[in-house]
Amino acid sequence: MRILLTGGAGFIGSHTAVEMAQNGHEIVILDNYSNSDESVLERLEKIIGSPVIFEEGDIRDYDRLYEVMEKHHIEAVVHFAGLKAVGESCAMPIEYFDNNVAGTVTLLRAMKALNIKKLIFSSSATVYGVPQYLPLDEKHPLSSTNPYGRTKLHIEEILRDVAASDPEWSIVCLRYFNPIGAHASGLIGENPRGIPNNLLPYVARVANGQLKAVQVFGSDYETPDGTGVRDYIHVVDLAYGHVCAVNYSANHQGWVAINLGTGIGYSVLDIIRAYEKACGKPIAYQLVDRRPGDVAANWADPKLAKELLGWEAKLSLQDMCESSWKFQQSC
Ligand code: NAD
Ligand code: UFG
């Protein structure tokens, strides 16, 4: 299929571009580079081995979206573009609702005008709020504790209404758990601007000497070693999940939300140990207070993805840390 990847220059979008191209899809990337840059193009072309179509543009710009999708005869959209920092969303809720929610509505308007009715949306495990039980399956009640999470919840609801309005729509909301790691080539990965908010990029920068020590947020949780537990998933596995979702959308209509996770929880200290093994040196860390808003543990029930998409995560925590380290050394 000819697929538009909004936000395709970013961390998950760039890995998905590779998997899509390697599985026979034609891709067009649209990005405003607010959290990425054009250098990823060259790296993608090196991995894929052929030219990649990049269009600079903003998902809030209807005319630009219409023009790009019409020009490239787009048949399906994978929608990654959005802002994603929880803390920033509390300080800038208007920007988050504008970019994520209004941007998605603009995208839907342009898709509808062009009769493009297949959409895969980047949702998040954040829509489960504070877990009432584990593992988290798709029937778990939804809630959110911050504006970023609310943008994902609102968008899921909007998409559900859109699918209900017209049986031709096929909409898959993929609820990602914690994507980490990098492509095996070491050419693309996660390299956030400034001090990283997320654990893995922080650990990677301690490993290469850019930062001094990992602050472990909380060591008194009710978890096996007292530190927070998450379902870390290799970004390449996650990216392949989008290929499966696009293939699913080719012969299924309606709306569905599907977890993409491994079903395994690792603690912060497990991650630090695995990274030490990957980079061959000790990672300094300090146990500090809990980070406000964090939950003790969450991990996915990944059964629905297997059942509907035939997808399951294959790569190990060690693969995640080794690929991250390989990429980090090239930054
Ligand atoms: P990222 O910031 O690396 O990628 C997002 C891309 O979207 C960037 O290249 C950015 O420049 C672009 N973008 C942002 N606003 C845009 C706009 N208005 N118009 C066009 N392009 C725009 O983030 P990521 O980690 O690759 O996340 C991709 C998606 O997955 C996001 O929607 C995010 O909320 C969601 N998600 C991410 C995680 C995670 O831990 N990384 C977890 C759950 C869900
Ligand atoms: N952590 C630390 N030190 C750090 C950063 C994180 O100890 O410097 C801990 C956190 O307390 C948590 C774990 O590492 O226990 C993971 O934290 P991240 O910030 O990497 O990830 P979160 O689980 O908080 O959230 C991420 C994304 C969200 C997304 C969610 C999906 O940031 O946007 O995964 O489950 F919604």
Image (tube, grey):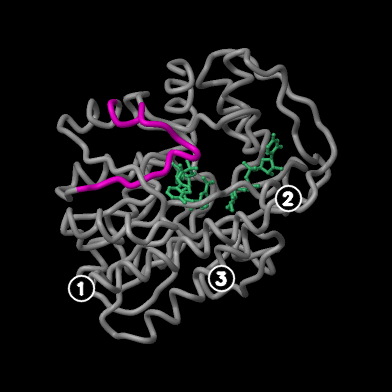
Pick the residue in front: 76 or 213.
76
Indicate the position of residue 219 as horizontal and vertical percent values. 80, 39
Q: Nearer the viewer, residue 280 or 159?
A: 159
Q: Which residues are magenta?
A: 27-42
**Whole-percent x, y for residue 198 in the image:** 62, 38
Query: Going from the N terminus, do you reach mark 1 or mark 2 first?
Result: 2
Instruction: Say what amino acid the circle numbered 2 marks.
Output: Ala
Spatial CA distance of label 3 from label 1 is 26 Å
Rendered residue at 61%/72% (across/down): 142
Q: Distance from label 2 to label 3 (Cα)?
A: 19 Å
Q: Amino acid at mark 1?
A: Asn
SS category of the residue bearing label 1: loop
Q: Residues within 10 Å of mark 3 (few under 14, many from 20)?
A: some
Please rate how many residues cluster around mark 2, counting C-alpha atoms within 10 Å: few if below 14, some from 14 to 19, many from 20. Answer: few
User: Which residue: 35% across, 39% down?
Assistant: 14
Mark 2 secondary-structure assignment: helix
Q: Position of residue 224 (x, y in %)?
A: 72, 45
Mark 3 in CB contact with mark 1 (< 8 angstroms): no
* 3D distance between C-alphas at marks 1 and 2: 42 Å
For disc 1, the marked residue is 251
Ligand 2 visible in quadrant: top right
Compared to residue 249, the image places residue 24 above or below, namely above
In magenta stretch: residue 253: no
Tell me the tag on residue 154.
3
Write down the residue under mark 2.
Answer: 91
What amino acid type is highlighted by mark number 3? His
